[in-house]
Image (cartoon, rainbow, N blue to C red):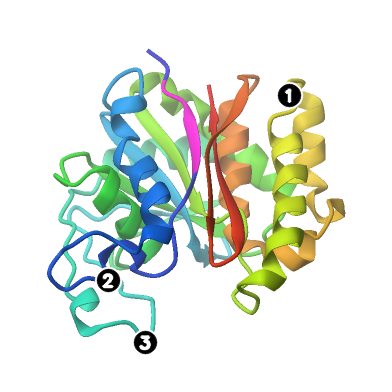
């Protein structure tokens, strides 16, 4: 059975784990947390592995993590001490990483491997909610540092065969990511951006959809939403991996005044 490809919001820092006693997250984050918690059960079958590209890892060449037991990389700052002791001990998936690298090379992309970098919070924060048992192997893939939208869609297309092998392809980012603006000033422009982005992403014509998303910077309030687009590029990979499948918005919430969406392809 073919699994979908997903673009999911990973929240802000360790947002779901701020209570040192492990209590509920801030009500603002609970709709997103609930979405992530139900993610695996919403799939047609449980994934054999996950290939995840995070907005927090960029390299000059597409890089695949081939470690067996990656540590966590606490790449957030100024949060409570207990959030630097979180655990998510899932195994790596080096065989999936190497299969992905082969597909990418066949499509003309250069790749490299590495095994030392820890999983950043774009991985472990959402996955700790989505896979609390840490029992699905995961391979992380970097963005390419040029952040070219067309190439990242092509990267996703090259990876699409993994969906037929029981691998869940996940882009982890945020559909709105401007840390300099929060509260009332963000509400109207982020909602306008979100509506325009959703219209482009869910366009039923796959060729037109890709073109509209490649041209994301022309959408209303695009640079207000993404002064730098690293948190949007995982969406391009998921869209490419989705191929001609229909796209839907399967999450929408409001945090910090931001309209935030997640998308499913297939």
Q: Is residue 235 left or right of residue 251?
A: right
Is 239 magenta? The answer is: no
Q: In this view, does 103 lie to the left or right of 42?
A: right
In the rendering, at what x and y percent does residue 196 appear?
A: 78, 44
Name the residue that disc number 1 marks.
Answer: 206
Give the residue drawn at x 23%, y 60%.
70
Dominant SS of magenta comes to: strand
User: Which circle's residue, 2 or 3, is located before the other in the chain?
Assistant: 2
Answer above or below: position of 120 versus 128: below
Front residue of this view, candidates 115 and 193: 193
Pointer 2 with pointer 3, Cβ within 8 A:
no
Name the residue that disc number 3 marks.
Answer: 78
Give, as a single range, the part of the protein colored magenta: 3-7
Give the residue drawn at x 62%, y 53%.
233
Give the residue drawn at x 84%, y 54%.
220
Task: Judge the density around disc 1: few (<14), some (14-19), many (≥20) Cα neighbours within 10 Å.
Answer: some
The numbered mark at residue 107 is none
Quarter the N terminus occupies: top left
- Across the whole image, how many numbered discs are drawn on residues? 3
Answer above or below: position of 64 versus 35: below
Mark 1 residue element: helix
Give the label, 2 or 3, closer to the camera. 2
User: Which circle's residue, 1 or 3, is located before the other in the chain?
Assistant: 3
Is 5 magenta? The answer is: yes
In the rendering, at what x and y percent does residue 179 appear?
A: 59, 75
Q: Is residue 108 visible?
A: no
Pointer 2 with pointer 1, Cβ within 8 A:
no
Front residue of this view, candidates 152 and 232: 232
Name the residue that disc number 2 marks.
Answer: 18
């Amino acid at each position: 059975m073919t699994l979908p490809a997903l673009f999911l919001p990973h929240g802000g820092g360790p947002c779901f784990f701020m209570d040192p006693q492990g209590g509920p997250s801030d009500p603002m984050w609970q709709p997103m947390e609930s979405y992530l918690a139900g993610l695996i059960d919403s799939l047609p079958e449980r994934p054999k592995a996950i290939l995840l590209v995070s907005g927090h890892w960029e390299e000059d060449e597409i890089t695949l993590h081939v470690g067996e037991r990656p540590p966590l990389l606490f790449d957030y700052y100024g949060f409570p001490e207990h959030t630097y002791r979180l655990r998510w001990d899932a195994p790596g998936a080096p065989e999936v990483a190497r299969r992905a690298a082969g597909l990418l090379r066949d499509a003309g992309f250069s790749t490299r491997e590495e095994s030392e970098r820890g999983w950043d919070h774009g991985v472990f924060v959402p996955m700790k909610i989505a896979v609390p048992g840490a029992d699905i192997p995961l391979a992380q893939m970097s963005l390419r540092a040029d952040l070219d939208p067309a190439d990242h869609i092509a990267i996703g297309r090259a990876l699409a065969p993994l969906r037929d092998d029981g691998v869940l392809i996940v882009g982890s980012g945020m559909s709105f990511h401007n840390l300099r603006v929060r509260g009332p000033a963000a509400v109207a422009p982020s909602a306008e951006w979100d509506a325009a982005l959703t219209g482009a992403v869910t366009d039923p014509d796959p060729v037109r959809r890709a073109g509209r998303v490649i041209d994301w910077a022309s959408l209303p309030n695009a640079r207000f939403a993404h002064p730098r687009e690293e948190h949007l590029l995982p969406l391009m990979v998921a869209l490419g991996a989705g191929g001609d499948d229909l796209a839907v918005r399967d999450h929408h919430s409001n945090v910090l005044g931001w309209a935030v969406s997640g998308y499913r392809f297939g």
